[in-house]
Image: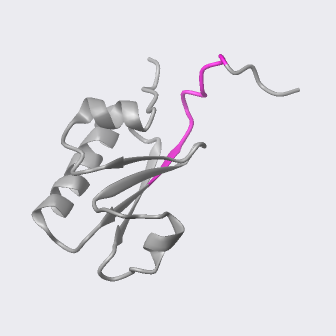
Amino acid sequence: MSPDPVTPPDPDEKYHLRLYVTGGTTRSRAAIANLRRICEEHLPGRHAIEVIDLLEQPELAEGDQILAAPTLIRRLPPPSLRVIGDLSDTERVLIGLDFRPKET
């Protein structure tokens, strides 16, 4: 039997995030800092961040169909979701990646 689609996700679910950046640009550094801040505030202990520098590993862009950087991809939990930009708009990031704050 499949799970009920209206059942909220497990509040202890881990998020695997992949951030594509291009070198040490101002936008890249801002995206990394913003992502770390958002995760520490909204997903403490429930996230893993992988930063991919497209200047060093351009071949990885094809698999995730990266057309712009910075691009953040939520790889887990499914479905895969993405946000493009420096992640300075916290609300947009939270909505775009469907983050679920841990219930207290």
Residue 88 screen position, x and y as percent: 18, 42
Q: Is residue 35 left or right of residue 82?
A: left
Residue at 22 percent across and 47 percent down: it is 34
In the image, which residues are magenta? Answer: 6-17
The quadrant the C terminus occupies is top left
Residue 43 screen position, x and y as percent: 40, 36
In this rendering, is residue 48 above or below 59? above
Q: How many marks?
A: 0
In this rendering, is residue 64 above or below 94? below
Residue found at the far right of this picture:
1
Residue 25 screen position, x and y as percent: 14, 68
Question: How would you classify the magenta stretch by its main secondary structure?
Answer: loop
Q: Is residue 27 left or right of residue 56?
A: left
Q: Is residue 43 visible?
A: no
The quadrant the N terminus occupies is top right
Q: Is residue 7 visible?
A: yes
In this rendering, is residue 35 above or below 22? above
Residue at 16 percent across and 54 percent down: it is 30
Residue 94 screen position, x and y as percent: 35, 33
